[in-house]
Image: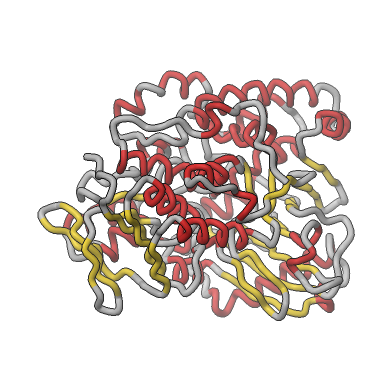
């Protein structure tokens, strides 16, 4: 049942998905209040400062910026008045321990020249892969990412197309049908790790990431991702949205099977019949609804699913920059398949690494004092349900191993140049973000945990309860959580007919951005 203009709603959590949902509801005449337990907005997307160095806490890759711009357009505002988004070249710099370097972007001349070095026929194989990925993009992103799957039959309607597009085949296996070089296979499959998925397990549907990037580019926000969050936060308040920072929700009240309000940790209560949770589903069912037997059952059910890996993140500021780095750097170790088995299946913390190194100061000097650099490096690690690592003890040891590795292979003189630093471990993901098992991306994006088989945008057991963010359809990543906000709010405001997303009318040309 749709709610009418002038009704009220509450959103729990101010991550990007929660912000996007709050903006959409408020823009459509639903008086919305956003509750955030921290004293700053953004959830995992917030930024912080240490002695003049600015760090983005979590997501760093902006793809499909039009879905962000769509939020401003919906409110009658211009995105450029709130945040400056600029395209990056290359999208990613991929590097190997033996000195190999590959710059991935949308320039066919550059890509062909680099791929020819991998051997004859690889460029042609890449072209065939892109043609396949383009078809997946049309089916999996353009048509499905912004709409909810409210029934099994809604999933079955698209099942023939998904099967035809090898949805049951892992993306690494599909990529291997087109190219022979192991390094090129890594280049074309690593992206799923950025949304929490093992490329040896995750569906080939996620090959859509490549045409998505090529059509709309990879971008950064001037001043870091925190500036993106700040812009959305300001937009929401400019259109009349209400905010409650430092307001942790303790309980979602339910009467007669329907949401009736919220109870805060400080004892306050708030009456509302529509609640959108930007929390992890285990947090929602297992804590916010723990007083209800049906919720306990749901928490147990979802807790048995496959969750994404966790991350060890090390933030550091240096008094110098390092040659050869790009904005986004993927650093491959000497193992790929076996390393990912250690992380996703065996649950061990290996001695070797594949790392993502974020170096925004390469393009944005505002992120660090003059002459210095702001960085974070993340290492995928098993979530806490797969190992019993004491991260309080092991964290500093692991940090030192990563510093030594970076210094040896990519950043000579690193240790002596570090002026500020901070660690964030799987234990912190669990305590700071209430992430089940310290998972960094909620449910792993396997086919059997996607679309209808993922947490639904509208809860079927508690009327008036909705979900947004990485836990629900379509999943993690900035486009994913922003698209989830559209799917969710359409169910609230116009459940019988969901409106067209921005990309339906702009498939061949990216929005003009500064």
> In terms of image quadrants, where is residue 63?
top right
What residue lies at 55% left-to-right and 31% top-to-bottom? 503
Residue pushed farthest left?
256
Q: Is residue 115 left or right of residue 243?
A: right
Which of these two is toward me, 248 or 449? 248
What residue lies at 41% left-to-right and 23% top-to-bottom? 158
Q: As displayed, is residue 409 above or below residue 212?
A: below
> In terms of image quadrants, where is residue 38?
bottom left
Which of these two is toward me, 338 or 180? 180
Q: Point out the image quarter for the N terminus.
A: top left
| Residue 166, position as x, y percentages in the image | 52, 24
| Residue 196, position as x, y percentages in the image | 54, 50
Q: Is residue 386 visible?
A: no
Q: Is residue 256 left or right of residue 19?
A: left
Q: As displayed, is residue 368 above or below residue 341?
A: below
Q: Is residue 229 left or right of residue 402?
A: left
| Residue 439, position as x, y percentages in the image | 48, 59
All told, the count of numbered labels is: 0
What residue lies at 18% left-to-right and 65% top-to-bottom? 291
Q: Can residue 177 be seen in this view?
A: yes
> In terms of image quadrants, where is residue 57?
bottom right
Which of these two is toward me, 119 or 428? 428
| Residue 251, position as x, y percentages in the image | 25, 67
Which of these two is toward me, 471 or 352? 471
Q: As displayed, is residue 421 above or below residue 129?
A: below
Q: Is residue 301 left or right of residue 393?
A: left
Q: As displayed, is residue 13 above or below residue 54?
A: above
Model colouring: secondary structure
């Amino acid at each position: 049942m749709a709610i009418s203009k002038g009704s009220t709603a509450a959103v729990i959590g101010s991550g990007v998905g929660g912000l996007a949902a709050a903006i959409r509801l408020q823009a459509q005449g639903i008086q919305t209040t956003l509750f955030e337990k921290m004293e700053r907005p953004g959830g995992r997307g917030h930024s912080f400062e240490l002695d003049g160095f600015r760090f983005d806490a979590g997501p760093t890759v902006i793809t499909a910026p039009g879905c962000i711009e769509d939020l401003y357009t919906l409110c009658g505002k211009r995105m450029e008045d709130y945040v400056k988004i600029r395209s990056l070249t290359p999208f990613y710099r991929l590097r190997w321990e033996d000195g190999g370097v590959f710059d991935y972007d949308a320039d066919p001349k550059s890509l062909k020249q680099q791929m020819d070095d991998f051997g004859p026929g690889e460029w042609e194989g890449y072209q065939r892969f892109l043609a396949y990925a383009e078809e997946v993009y049309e089916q999996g992103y353009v048509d499905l990412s912004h709409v909810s799957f409210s029934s099994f039959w809604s999933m079955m309607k698209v099942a023939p197309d998904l099967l035809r597009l090898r949805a049951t085949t892992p993306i690494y296996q599909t990529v291997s049908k087109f190219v022979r070089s192991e390094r090129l296979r890594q280049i074309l499959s690593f992206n799923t790790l950025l949304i929490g998925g093992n490329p040896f397990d995750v569906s080939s549907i996620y090959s859509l990431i490549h045409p998505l990037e090529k059509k709309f580019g990879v971008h950064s926000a001037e001043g870091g991702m925190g500036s993106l969050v700040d812009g959305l936060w300001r937009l929401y308040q400019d259109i009349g949205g209400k905010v409650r920072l430092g307001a942790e929700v303790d309980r979602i009240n339910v009467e007669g099977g329907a949401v009736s309000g919220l109870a805060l940790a400080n004892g306050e209560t708030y009456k509302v019949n529509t609640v959108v949770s930007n929390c992890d589903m285990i947090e929602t069912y297992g804590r916010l609804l723990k007083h209800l037997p049906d919720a306990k059952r749901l928490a147990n059910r979802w807790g048995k699913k496959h969750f994404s890996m966790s991350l060890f993140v090390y933030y550091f500021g240096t008094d110098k920059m390092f040659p050869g780095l790009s904005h986004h750097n993927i650093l491959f170790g000497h193992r790929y398949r076996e390393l990912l088995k250690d992380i996703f299946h065996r649950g061990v913390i290996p001695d070797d690494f594949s790392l993502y190194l974020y170096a925004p100061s390469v393009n944005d000097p505002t992120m660090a004092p003059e002459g210095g650099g702001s960085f974070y490096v993340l290492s995928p690690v098993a979530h806490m349900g797969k190992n019993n690592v004491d991260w309080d003890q092991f964290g500093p040891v692991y940090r030192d191993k990563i510093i030594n590795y970076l210094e040896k292979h990519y950043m000579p003189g690193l240790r002596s140049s570090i002026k500020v630093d901070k660690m964030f471990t799987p234990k912190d993901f669990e305590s700071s973000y209430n992430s089940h098992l310290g998972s960094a991306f909620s449910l792993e994006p396997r086919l059997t945990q996607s679309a209808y088989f993922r947490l639904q945008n509208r809860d079927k057991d508690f009327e008036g309860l909705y979900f947004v963010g990485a836990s629900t359809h379509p999943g993690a990543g900035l486009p994913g959580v922003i698209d989830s906000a559209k799917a969710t709010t359409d169910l609230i405001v116009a459940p019988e007919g969901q409106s067209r997303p921005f990309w339906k009318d702009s498939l061949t040309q990216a929005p003009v951005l500064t």
